[in-house]
Image (cartoon, coloured by chain):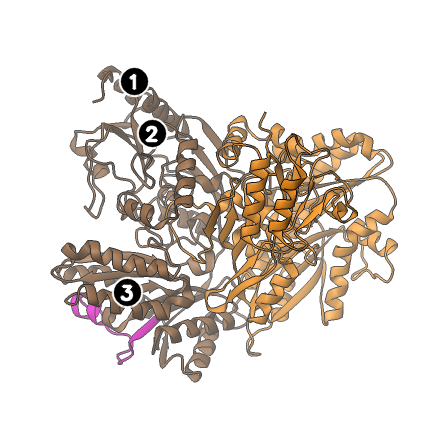
Chain colours: A brown, B orange
């Protein structure tokens, strides 16, 4: 406990936050807030504040200010880079937004809804659905992650090609600033050119500049029919041509376009029970692709027919060798199983594993893919290095699996990231910086850019109270 | 000329900028840079710097810094709020980006291109087209306005409902900072979560925080076929239902959705030669609506057929009373004429005119529309107050025409804007702040928000060099 922070003062905050609003940092109940779900990051805190409204968040921030404490905002705590986990021995409070979990309103004719930070992503999707609308953000953790975390990390996921990242789904924000003031910026407008757009300061800032307490989100006409295809393609270059044809010939209705390797298919089929290879063949690459339509009338062409026509053209042009269109929900689920079980299957290999999350310009994927395989094999010849993922937005998830990869990690990181940067890519596509990539941020950003980021941090949080030690270093 | 600024020093800058790089502020050639095209704003400057590359912009900024001058960045100078026009007697240089007008690259498979700030919007559209792609930003001034101006003002236009504002079309930026440093942020990536997204600081900042010199822009599959409809609808509320049905039943392919009143149709038909009413009737409102598809194969349903089906449903449900689908390019052009000639027709009425550009939540349009008509008639009973425009994104362009409206302007402004704010709207949808709306910005933004804007200005431009006196006040 920091100097001068009497227990009586904490009682004051706890009482302001009401029943269940405060968990002592030393109690068992605090454990899930101090260790992330992947168990890669663990830390400590004086306690966990769990307000149920923006006023409670303001009270917490004011308390932290007066007591000289840092604050680590936290949503579903499903991040992969330790952004929501405190450091050890840190003089901080965890601020959990999970109890701020109301959908405040859904406005179908404005294609918007207002959700509080603690709303589970899946619940936000459901709320839109109940009003015949669609909230397109979708990712593996959607049953546990929260809107506040999604926005603070600018989450990506599988629908980015059509709907953009989390940042692009936001019309307005409500934010508690480091000094406890409330910025009410929830106006749900499509056009608003009245000065600087402050929302973009807080989106993707991983809670280092303020606390997002609610958001006005874009929602869309609801897709009524979805077609799902599993496509064999001879190369990454051909895969991009398949995507190009499919985008044009479905009326740009492609929502998902995942690149999957023969190796991943084999791994999942081998290690996971009851999984079958949708299209046994020697093809080195597959694409899992979905197109949807919002049309509810049965007239006109179905997305299945459109996708079929597009893939027929791709096969004729030699960019695909074979393709299956799911004929049932079960078959669609079977295609998705391969993609979704890949992380678990690779864990079942029971070997040390290092992972990366990079983006490239989409057009650079073919050349990068080969260059990365070659370089990484030079550094760790015994390891199995492979990449797959969200081809449609240039985002590949790579892993290196082998007995010695943990020791080789630093050199592997450096080799891959140097190459990514040479191809004008990003060393963190959707997972963010958190604790894990702060060295890389400093290494790979230009001095000008790093200095601007420090300037923003200094301007908004001069006392360094917000999520201390994450993203930028201030010393 | 400011104290201590010897002519010899200006010669130095002029020579660094090369042939045609400097125009003296007192010469006739400087006039177009000192008065905006609508002739509502005029000012003065020491001269006009016209660099051809980022190094020239840096040289200009460094010169301005050493000489203690302000800098007014300028693109096509087609803005409507005086954002690109200097004030009178201002101790400034105009920095015209018009000669920085190269398309640096087009990357069709990455669906991106890099354009310099001075590229004319129409030329950017053409460059995309030549690579079988589409750059969707489209507005009245597209033959003269420039990409740098479009991005600095976060331009809107007619395709926002489907593609977003200018801000949303940007992947990366190259920016010269107030101190002359260059931030190279052009990586053309769809996912990049490596720290704060700096591009959003400069987009929409009207040149008050730095100078955008180039941008990596999103481009899209090219629409191959477009359907255009002219729809009669009994009320604003019904118009929104027509749009809802059309979005769903075309697979969300609506690109444009303009609300037009009976009064506007009558005014254009009366004052402009050769214009015919597409659908003579008593209907108080019409919708000009377009849907497009990127499909190049002729199979499947055409956008005409989809729009026809959707409008049939809307008529059946009583939300529309009649509809025409253009059967030729000529007919499509005739529909658009009504929309595009409206500003000119209202000028031909040869009466004093005051205009506004506001956004509302789309769902609030019906109630707001009636309330605004009522209030404005109370303030100026003799004037003709009417609004129409981009219904699909909640953006209405209003005007008040009458002998005394110029004298009544302050009260009219206040009445309309108070109402807009009460409905959670914006007092400047797409035109920005510039010189014209700085009072409103201070009045209608909360103190918290205004202070944050001042903080950004102070952080990025501590000497107040960039476009002085625009957007926020610093005293």
Ranked by sequence position, the earlier of labels 1 and 2 is: 1
Tell me what residue is drawn at x 11 percent, y 61 percent.
Answer: A403
Side of B307 where A165 appears, left or right: left
Report the chain holding disc 1: A
Highlighted magenta segment, given as a residue range = A266-287
Q: Secondary structure at mark 2?
A: loop
Residue identifier under label 3: A387
x, y percentage for residue B393?
60, 49
Q: Residue B37, can we see it?
A: no
Q: Residue A475, can we see it?
A: yes
Residue identifier under label 2: A465
Residue identifier under label 1: A12
x, y percentage for residue A294?
50, 61
Picture layout, residue B287 above or below residue A99: below
**Between tags 1 and 3, which lies in front?**
3
Q: Quadrant of residue B440?
A: top right
């Amino acid at each position: 406990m920091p100097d001068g922070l009497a227990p009586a003062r904490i009682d004051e905050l706890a009482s302001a936050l009401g029943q269940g609003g405060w968990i002592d940092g030393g109690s068992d109940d605090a454990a899930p807030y101090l260790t992330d779900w992947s168990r890669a990051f663990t830390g400590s805190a004086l306690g966990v504040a769990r307000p149920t409204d923006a006023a409670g968040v303001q009270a917490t921030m004011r308390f932290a200010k007066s007591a000289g404490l840092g604050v680590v905002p936290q949503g579903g705590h499903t991040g992969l880079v330790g952004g929501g986990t405190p450091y050890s021995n840190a003089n901080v409070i965890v601020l959990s937004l999970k109890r701020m979990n109301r959908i405040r309103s859904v406005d179908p004719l404005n294609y918007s809804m207002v959700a509080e930070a603690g709303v589970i992503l899946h619940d936000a999707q459901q709320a839109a659905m109940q009003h015949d609308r669609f909230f397109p953000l979708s990712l593996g953790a959607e049953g546990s992650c929260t809107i506040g975390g999604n926005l603070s990390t600018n989450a990506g996921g599988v629908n980015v090609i059509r709907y953009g990242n989390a940042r692009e789904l936001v019309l307005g924000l409500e934010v508690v600033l480091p000094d406890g003031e409330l910025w009410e910026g929830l106006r749900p407008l499509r056009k608003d050119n009245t000065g600087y757009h402050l929302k973009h300061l807080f989106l993707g800032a991983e809670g280092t500049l303020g606390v997002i307490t609610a958001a006005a989100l874009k929602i869309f006409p609801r897709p009524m029919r979805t077609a799902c295809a599993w496509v064999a393609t001879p190369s990454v270059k051909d895969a991009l041509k398949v995507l190009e044809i499919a985008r044009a010939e479905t009326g740009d209705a492609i929502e998902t376009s995942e690149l999957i390797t023969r190796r991943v298919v084999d791994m999942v089929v081998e290690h996971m029970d009851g999984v079958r290879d949708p299209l046994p063949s020697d093809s080195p690459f597959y694409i899992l692709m979905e197109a949807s339509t919002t049309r509810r009338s049965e007239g006109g062409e179905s997305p299945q027919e459109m996708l079929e026509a597009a893939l027929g053209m791709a096969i004729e042009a030699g960019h695909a060798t074979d393709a299956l269109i799911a004929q049932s929900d079960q078959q669609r689920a079977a295609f998705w199983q391969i993609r979704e079980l890949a992380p678990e299957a690779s864990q079942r290999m029971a070997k040390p594993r290092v992972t990366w999350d990079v983006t490239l310009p989409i057009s650079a994927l073919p050349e990068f893919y080969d260059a990365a395989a070659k370089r990484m094999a030079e550094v760790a010849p015994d390891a199995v290095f492979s990449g797959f993922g969200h081809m449609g937005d240039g985002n590949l998830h790579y892993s290196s699996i082998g007995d010695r990869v943990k020791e080789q990690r630093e050199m592997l990181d450096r080799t891959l990231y140097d190459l990514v940067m040479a191809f004008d890519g990003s060393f963190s596509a959707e997972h963010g910086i958190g604790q894990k990539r702060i060295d890389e941020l400093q290494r790979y950003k230009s001095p000008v850019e790093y200095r601007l980021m420090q300037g923003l941090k200094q301007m908004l949080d001069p006392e360094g109270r917000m999520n201390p030690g994450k993203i930028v270093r201030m010393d």
